[in-house]
Image (cartoon, rainbow, N blue to C red):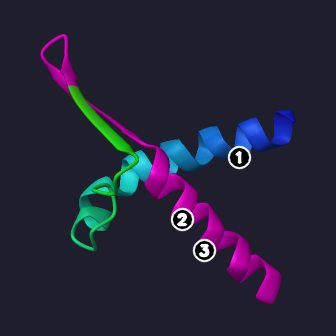
Amino acid sequence: MIRWLLVTVLALVLFSGLTPWLRRLGMGRLPGDLHFRAFGREWSLPIASTIVLSMIAAAIARLI
């Protein structure tokens, strides 16, 4: 359970760093991605995009 939590957190951190590049590909705008403004800053929780990227990574790992 802790491994999956760690993987999810690392995927969110990685996704946050790659957000500008991935937005050009349409990621970050899926129906499950949350965007809101709080404390004068825009916050993004890309839940659906993280799941999609995790599925792609799992498929690639399975092929290797």
Q: Secondary structure at mark 3?
A: helix
At 53% across and 64% down in the image, what residue appears? Answer: 52
Which residue is nearer to you in this view: 43 or 17?
43
| Alpha carbon separation for disc pair 2 and 1 | 12 Å
Give the amino acid at mark 2: Leu
Q: Residues within 10 Å of mark 1 (few under 14, many from 20)?
A: few
| Residue farthest along the bottom direction in this orientation | 63
* Residue 28 x %, y %: 32, 55
| Nearer mark to the viewer, of 2 and 1 | 2
Labels 2 and 1: the sequence-earlier one = 1
| Residue farthest along the left direction in this orientation | 40
| Alpha carbon separation for disc pair 2 and 3 | 5 Å
Q: Secondary structure at mark 1?
A: helix
Disc marking residue 7 = 1
Residue 12 as seen in the image, left or right of residue 33:
right
Residue bearing the label numbered 2? 53
Q: Are marks 1 and 3 in contact (CB under 8 Å)?
A: no
Give the position of the C terminus as an image quadrant.
Answer: bottom right
Q: Secondary structure at mark 2?
A: helix
Labels 1 and 3: the sequence-earlier one = 1
* Residue 47 x %, y %: 48, 45
* Residue 22 x %, y %: 32, 65
Q: Are marks 2 and 3 in contact (CB under 8 Å)?
A: yes
At 37% across and 57% down in the image, what residue appears? Answer: 18
Residue bearing the label numbered 3? 56
Residue 5 as seen in the image, left or right of residue 43:
right
Residue 28 as seen in the image, left or right of residue 38:
right
Query: Which region shows up in magenta?
Result: 37-64
- The rendered magenta stretch, by its main secondary structure, is classed as helix
